[in-house]
Image: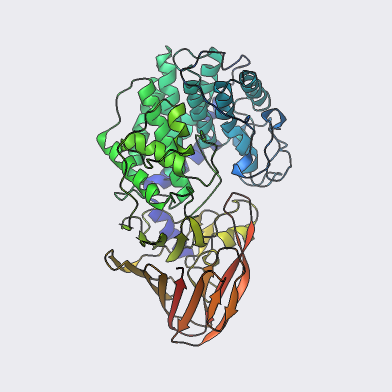
Amino acid sequence: MLLYKINTLMRLGLPNLVRVFLYQVGVRSKLNPVKRLQPEQIDDCVFRATKCNVHHSSSKSFVFKPFGWMNGEPVKDIVWMRSVLTGKCYSNMEKPWFCLSDFDSNVGDIKGIWEASRFDWVLGLAKDYLSGREQALDELNATTKGWLKHNSPYLGPNWKCGQEASIRVMHLAMAAKLLNQVESPEPALLAFVKAHLKRIAPTISYAVAQDNNHGTSEAAALFIGGSWLVSNGDKSAMRWQKIGRKWLENRAKHLIDCDGTFSQYSVNYHRVMLDTYSMAELWRRELNLNSFSPSMYTKIGLATQWLYQLTQEVNGDAPNLGHNDGARLLPLSDSDYRDFRPTVQLASVLFLKSSAWEKAGSYDDPLKLLGLSKPQQALNKPSSFHFAQGGYAGLRSQTGAFALFNYPIFRFRPAQNDALHVDFWLDGVNLLRDGGTFSYNAGQAYIDYYGGTQSHNTVQFDEHEQMPRLSRFLLGAWLKAEHVHWDEARQYCSASYRDYLGCSHKREVFLSNSTLRVVDDIHGVQKKAILRWRLSPGKWVISGNQISNHIHSITINSNTDIKRLELIEGKESRYYYQETSIPVLEIEVTSDGKITTEYNYR
């Protein structure tokens, strides 16, 4: 296992390892200037009453709804030190952030503390004010003051993560845009933003070293906040503006493949990245700054097309692929957390000069609020695709079915053991499903289950994982796909891998107008191998080698003896920290062979 650890660390990249090392040394000593920051008192109002260019109609007042599914509450009832997940209170709100542990707090998952401090409510209350509820502005200022009272700069858990600080900056800036207060902001608002940039800038190299959305978020905050300060006479902030622009360009070039795949192999983190770049571009236009490079716009356009292909037009849902941490930036639409259309529509207008969807819908709300015209030109309808750099193939039938097949090609660290997973959809309904994430810190059992092979529609050999887990966020012995084939005319794709213990799995996927057919060829079975199909909720019944819910049927055939064909209760998490039961079909064999699955959906 030591050899796998060394090899994995080297694949993370020597420059990134050096950045992390220097960050840790700098923070543990007093070499990093972030440890010498002195807070300034900020107690005035951050927004003022103003005449706005955009008016928003809404029939209901904003309520804070954590992670998009928990019970809503008025912002006045938010308790900043209380976790929305566990109800427990953080006891070290007055300690410098660098003295606090990442995962050993008394409240459990730290995201329960961070959620309210992402300032989604700033946008929600700004929208309320635009709809004519004047009291919302008082609530916005009072809530911000309350946050500062309990979260003094650089003290407590809400200053620990540079990305969390960056999300606050972006949301404050977008609220200022909505309220027409970018050009002449309140001094307290600029002071608040500057306090955040002082926290973010000294540790940007650590964010960059992660090769994920930490770098994009922090770069955007530095660009947005730095340029805002410069435009209001603070020339010392020019360095932040330049650093932010530099890393926005660099991260797009480095983290987004030529097929639009983002480094985190996650649908939700892809959304976070896209919304981040959308906010950066909106801000650039707002201040009439120089355009970003053509190559950056090209990469973000490709990333927009990537998410467009995976998003269901009928309801905006998408495969629960990779990590899903409950993040949703720039929530200007009242749609569900799992509706990815507002993000795609906004990015499509900004970076592709086209509408993703011509038909009017709630996904157009951000365009109206941000003063953007909806283009008459529209993107081509989603079709079958092959994203060869990221390892994704999508098959579409003429009868409304969509199959997503992902195979292992890892330029960056893989998120989950989901090699050769198949996600299957029909008319916006997820029929064969990915388990999700649930939580990053609810115990090892949850990490192992949701990040493991058993949480995906694939084969597990002898109860071991496709890739061994080295730490909470790091897998070893990265798989590499072989024999990759893609034939759009035949609606066919296939790939195979051999894992670190010598087990091999080849999967072929065929999609017709009535049937999804999957052939699994497995070798290296010692005692047993289990093929799992994670089904949509419903009453499924097994009869011989067939299973049915009286709407669809699944037939299993094999050239080796099937020891067990059984329905068990599995778990899935489609929203962060929410867990529900689903039926899982398990097919167990004890020797090498081929297993053929036919899902008859029409």
Of residue 176 and residue 499, the one placed in the foreground of this image is 176
Residue at 62% of width from left, 31% of height from top? 62
- For the C terminus, the image quarter is bottom left
> Is the residue 233 above or below the residue 320 in the image?
above
Residue at 46% of width from left, 60% of height from top? 425
| Scheme by which the image is coloured | rainbow
What is the quadrant of residue 119 in the picture? top right
Viewer can see residue 187: yes
Q: Position of residue 130 (x, y in %)?
A: 54, 22
Q: Position of residue 19 (x, y in %)?
A: 43, 41
Residue at 40% of width from left, 36% of height from top? 346
Of residue 550 and residue 564, the one placed in the foreground of this image is 550
Q: Tell me if 92 is positioned left or right of 221 in this view.
A: right
Viewer can see residue 159: no
Residue at 36% of width from left, 62% of height from top? 397
Of residue 197 and residue 341, the one placed in the foreground of this image is 341
Q: Position of residue 301 (x, y in %)?
A: 32, 41
> Is the residue 148 above or below the residue 348 in the image?
above
> Is the residue 344 above or below the residue 130 in the image?
below
Q: Position of residue 351 (x, y in %)?
A: 33, 36
